[in-house]
Every structure is written in structure tokens, then in C-alpha cells.
């Protein structure tokens, strides 16, 4: 695979491209899908794809090589497309290698796993023991191998392995709960706990009533809080800032959250988002996006870094920089203490359909789903439905009152695209409106 990557770069340069990046990704992932409390299908992949980026006179093209016997032919077509494409005046080249990378932190027990049925059974049983009637979801063992070669001297090899389970538990169509378990090590993988959590939420969510508009103090479960963290990480990309898709324009060095909030991006941390290098081959590292409430950096590749007169943060995205894994600094509260601070408010466990009314101002809305609970004096007194969280991203983060000591690693395709280590959070005076759904 190293040879394929090198051949792609060589072909691109010989055909006139000034910059070329080739990354060969070999996927050996395994999946079990389950529904109605039992596995329904298992899938296993073994495929290799060549991801190609090339620039010809600042004309940028991205494509794929799927037939490695036709590398030169495929790259030739991409160069022809680049020659007739529009020039990208913002493109400023690639990071200059070579680079040294830290040792891969890999659990071989994850790679050796060939059957996830026990994990699926444990998750389902956990939910049923809590009183759920029906469960559905999926288990994944991800195993990918990455070979990177660039025309600017970067070469890298990375093996990424991780475990993931998502379970939805239902008591009725209106009473559901969601649990996830994510880990890069088998010893840290807890599908049974995810099942128990989904089941408990589903049982608590029985017989919901339509919610009422207003401003509420809200305890955010790690899964929904992770979606808010994901928004901060994604909107801190320098590409989205300069394109007008972020409220963080001209906010560097300014307060964008409460002093309780520190958010790092760290592709080198032991999470399911771990990777040794970014898409230009730059080593990943920890950096604070928000520190004690202050915006410290945008996320950069080489091109955006030159535009902003700074250095790459190791977050390429060759087109748009992006976070690898997001970590929130834990607070000093227990979950029960956070609940005890809520005299009249809500506990939200999950969300979907996050949409912006204005990217520049940060006005957004999202629809809470699964368990939505009314809290008085720290106790659950009612279950709600049909509400929408409607607020401003920066102002919401400024009203973070407290974060829990305990954190959970969360991700799911609906709202938390970037693996995130998130605590429970108490946020004051959050806007709630009615949802038509």
C-alpha cells in the first residue's frame, strides 16, 4: 500500500501537478445490526481505496483510486479536471515534511475481535432488565489502516481500531432512550452500561405531556452536551470562519463561554478519534480551542494558517480543517449536585436536527429527543415532548454554570460526528419553544 501511495504522488507530479497527497485506506471493519431484541445481520468489509488530492496552478481537485492497476490513468483524469477548474486563490500549499510521529497506541485485542454478538446481547439484556420492551441499534468494530504520502516529504502509517455500540430502547413509540459505548480498548468498552442507560431513560419517559415555552435551567446529559461541543469544534475551523459559517469571526482572545469551560482538540489522546497525523501528514497534538471561556485558536491547515498569519494546528482537512477528537475539561460537581441546583427546569438526554437561523450570529435550534424530563427541586416530576431548544451558541455557552467530574466518550451519526469526551452540564436560562414535530 505504501507503493500505491508513492505511485499516485509520482504520477501526479509527472503529469504536471505541483502538490499531491495520496492516502491509501484499507478498511477491515465489522458490524452487527440488531432490531426487535435480536441480531438481524452481520457485515464485514475488506476494501482499499486511494484518496487523492492534487493542485495544479492553485486549481484543487479531490478524487479516488479504486483500481490500483490504473493509477496513472486515474490520476491523469484528475489532472485534466484540475486544469479546467477554477483557481482557488486561498490555496497556499502543503506542510513541509518529513515528520516524526509518536508510537501508535493500539489495543491488539480490538483487532483480534471477530464476533460482537456477546456485546450486542449484553446491551440488549441491560435495556430489558430496566423495563424496555424493544431494542435496536448497531455494534461496530472499526479497523482501518492508513498509508500517507505527500509531494512535500511527509510519509506516515497509522492503524486505527475502535469499538462502538449504539442502542435505542423503547417502551412505546413516545417513550425511548439512547445509550452509546465507545472505546479504543476492550477493557474500557461497556455495552451493557449503554443498554442499562437507554432502558432507564425509556422507562422514565413514559406518558409524556407537551412541553411549555420559556427559559429553563437545564441539565444536559453527555450525549446532548456532546452535540453542543461538536458545534464549537466544527465552527472553530478557520475555513468556516472565513466562509461566514461561524459565529467565532473576530472572537480570538475574547470570551465565548463561561470560565468553567475549557475545550481541547486532541487527535493524539486515547479516544476513538485518535490518529497520528492529519491529512497533510502533520503530527496531531492537543490544543485548547476554548480555555477558561476564552477562544484561543481556530483550527488550521497550511492554507488557512497562511491566510491568518499563523501556523497549522495539525487539523487538515485539505479543503477544510476539522477537529479530530474533542475533550471537555471536567468540573468538580457530581451529577446529583447538578440536579440539586435545578429548582424548576429540565433534564435533556439527546437531540437531533440542529439547524442555524444565522451562522454569523450563532442563532440556532435543535430538537430534544428520547427522554425529556421536567425537574423541580432536583427531582423528576414530569416527562415532556414536542419542544425545541432555541438559543444562541455563544450566549448559551456563557451561561454554563457547572460541569460534572464524571465524563463519557460519546459519538453518534445524528449529532455528535466528532468523538467527544463530555461531562454532564448545567446551563442556566436556556430558551425552549414548541416543536411542530
Image: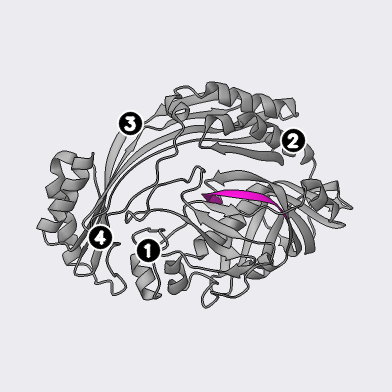
Q: x%, y% of residue 348?
A: 72, 51
Mark 4 to mark 2 CA distance (whole Å): 49 Å
The picture quadrant where one finds residue 213 is: bottom right
SS at badge 2: helix
**Label 2 crowd (10 A; few <14 / some 14-19 / many >=20):** many
Mark seen at residue 301: 1
- One can see residue 172 in this view: no
Badge 3 or badge 1: first in the primary sequence: 3
In the image, taking residue 307 as reference, residue 372 lies left or right, namely right
**Label 4 crowd (10 A; few <14 / some 14-19 / many >=20):** some
Mark 4 to mark 1 CA distance (whole Å): 16 Å
Badge 4 or badge 3: first in the primary sequence: 3
Badge 4 or badge 1: first in the primary sequence: 4
SS at badge 4: strand
The span shown in magenta is 415-425
Badge 4 or badge 2: first in the primary sequence: 4
Q: Is residue 125 magenta?
A: no
The picture quadrant where one finds residue 367 is: bottom right
Residue at figure coordinates x 89%, y 53% from the top left: 377
Give the mark toward the camera: 3 or 1.
Answer: 1
Mark seen at residue 200: 2
**Label 1 crowd (10 A; few <14 / some 14-19 / many >=20):** many
Mark seen at residue 372: none
Mark seen at residue 46: 3
Q: x%, y% of residue 229?
A: 59, 57
Give the mark toward the camera: 4 or 1.
Answer: 1
Amino acid at each position: 500500500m505504501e507503493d500505491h501511495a508513492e505511485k499516485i504522488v509520482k504520477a501526479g507530479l509527472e503529469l504536471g501537478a505541483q502538490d499531491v497527497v495520496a492516502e491509501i485506506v484499507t478498511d477491515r471493519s465489522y458490524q452487527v445490526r440488531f432490531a426487535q431484541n435480536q441480531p438481524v445481520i452481520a457485515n464485514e468489509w475488506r476494501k482499499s481505496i486511494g484518496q487523492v488530492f492534487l493542485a495544479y496552478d492553485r486549481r484543487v481537485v479531490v478524487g479516488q483510486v479504486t483500481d490500483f492497476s490504473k493509477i496513472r490513468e486515474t490520476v491523469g483524469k484528475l489532472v485534466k479536471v484540475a486544469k479546467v477548474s477554477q483557481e482557488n486563490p486561498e490555496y497556499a500549499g502543503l506542510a513541509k515534511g518529513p515528520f516524526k510521529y509518536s508510537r501508535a497506541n493500539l489495543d491488539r485485542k480490538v483487532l483480534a475481535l471477530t464476533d460482537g454478538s456477546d456485546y450486542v446481547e449484553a446491551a440488549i439484556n441491560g435495556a430489558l432488565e430496566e423495563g424496555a420492551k424493544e431494542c435496536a441499534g448497531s455494534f461496530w468494530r472499526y479497523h482501518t489502516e492508513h498509508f500517507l504520502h505527500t509531494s512535500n516529504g511527509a510519509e506516515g502509517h497509522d492503524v486505527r481500531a475502535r469499538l462502538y455500540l449504539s442502542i435505542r430502547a423503547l417502551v412505546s413509540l413516545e417513550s425511548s432512550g439512547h445509550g452509546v459505548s465507545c472505546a479504543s480498548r476492550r477493557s474500557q468498552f461497556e455495552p451493557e452500561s449503554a443498554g442499562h442507560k437507554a432502558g432507564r431513560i425509556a422507562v422514565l419517559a413514559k406518558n409524556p405531556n407537551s412541553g411549555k415555552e420559556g427559559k429553563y435551567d437545564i441539565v444536559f446529559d453527555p450525549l446532548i452536551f456532546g452535540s453542543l461541543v461538536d458545534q464549537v469544534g466544527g465552527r472553530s475551523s478557520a475555513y468556516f470562519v472565513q466562509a461566514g459559517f461561524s459565529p467565532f469571526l473576530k472572537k480570538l482572545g475574547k470570551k465565548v463561554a463561561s470560565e468553567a469551560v475549557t475545550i481541547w482538540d486532541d487527535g493524539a489522546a486515547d479516544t476513538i478519534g485518535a490518529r497520528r497525523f492529519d491529512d497533510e501528514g502533520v503530527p496531531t497534538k492537543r490544543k485548547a480551542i476554548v480555555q477558561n471561556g476564552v477562544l484561543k485558536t481556530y483550527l488550521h491547515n497550511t492554507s488557512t494558517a497562511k491566510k491568518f498569519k499563523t501556523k497549522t494546528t495539525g487539523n487538515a482537512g485539505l479543503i477544510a480543517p476539522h477537529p479530530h477528537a474533542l475533550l471537555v475539561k471536567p468540573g468538580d460537581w457530581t451529577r446529583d449536585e447538578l440536579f440539586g441546583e435545578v429548582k424548576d427546569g429540565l433534564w435533556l438526554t439527546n437531540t437531533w436536527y440542529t439547524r442555524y437561523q444565522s451562522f454569523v450570529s450563532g442563532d440556532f435550534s435543535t430538537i430534544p429527543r428520547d427522554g425529556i424530563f421536567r425537574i423541580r427541586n432536583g427531582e423528576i416530576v414530569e416527562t415532556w415532548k414536542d419542544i425545541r431548544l432555541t438559543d444562541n451558541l455563544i450566549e448559551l455557552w456563557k451561561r454554563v454554570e457547572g460541569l460534572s467530574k464524571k465524563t463519557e466518550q460519546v459519538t453518534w451519526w445524528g449529532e455528535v460526528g466528532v468523538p467527544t469526551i463530555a461531562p454532564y452540564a448545567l446551563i442556566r436560562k436556556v430558551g425552549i419553544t414548541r416543536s411542530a414535530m
